[in-house]
């Protein structure tokens, strides 16, 4: 699965989910690969950042695998 950052962020990020771990740090969802990190979403609260990660988990459960060649675009605030 590929992770795509929010469309409202000023840059485009497309990363493989199986090579990173995610963190909701305050109001931001960040992907880490052990060397660098990248912001995937910015929200008004930590609760909404966690909701965005939970949407990803729901999508993975629906697909049944993270190795499926699909994408997940981090939702905008209004989509939560």
Image (cartoon, grey):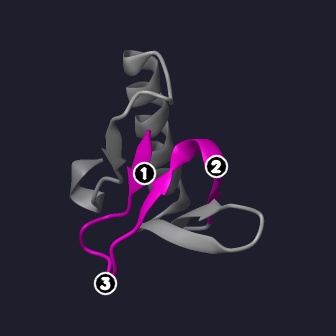
Mark 3–mark 2 contact, CB under 8 Å? Answer: no
Q: CA distance from mark 3 to mark 2?
A: 23 Å
Instruction: Please state the horizontal and vertical placement of residue 79, each as a whole percent of the image.
Output: 23, 50
Label drawn at residue 10: 3
Q: Position of residue 6 (x, y in %)?
A: 32, 64
Residue extent of the magenta highlight: 1-25
Please tell me which residue lies in front, 28 or 4. 4
Residue lying furthest bottom in this view? 10
- The residue nearer to you, when weighing 26 against 64, is 64
Label 3's element?
loop
Answer few, some or many: residues within 10 Å of disc 3's Cα (few below 14, many 20 plus, some between 14 and 19).
Answer: few
Q: CA distance from mark 1 to mark 3?
A: 16 Å
Secondary structure of residue under mark 1: strand
Question: Mark 1 or 2 closer to N-term?
Answer: 1
* Residue positioned 33% across, 42% down in the render: 71
Disc with the residue nearer the chain's start (1 vs 3): 1
Disc 2 crowd rating (10 Å Cα; few below 14, some 14-19, many 20+) is: few
Along the horizontal axis of the image, is 53 left or right of 80?
A: right
Instruction: Say which of 3 and 55 sits in front.
Output: 3
In the figure, 25 relative to 52: above or below? below
**Which residue is denoted by mark 2 in the rendering?**
19
Relative to residue 53, is residue 28 depicted above or below? below
Left or right of residue 42, residue 50 in this image? right
Residue 4 location (% of width, % of height): 36, 57
Quarter of the picture containing the N terminus is: top left
Taking the magenta stretch, the answer to whether it contains residue 44 is: no
Residue 54: which numbered mark, if any?
Answer: none
Report the disc number at residue 3.
1
């Amino acid at each position: 699965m590929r992770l795509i950052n929010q469309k409202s962020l000023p840059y485009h990020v497309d990363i493989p989910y199986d090579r990173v771990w995610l963190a909701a740090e305050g109001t931001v969802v960040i992907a880490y690969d052990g060397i660098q990190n990248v912001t995937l979403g910015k929200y008004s609260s930590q609760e909404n950042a966690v909701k965005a990660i939970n949407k990803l988990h729901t999508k993975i459960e629906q697909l049944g695998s993270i190795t499926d060649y699909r994408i997940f675009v981090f939702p905008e605030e209004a989509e939560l």
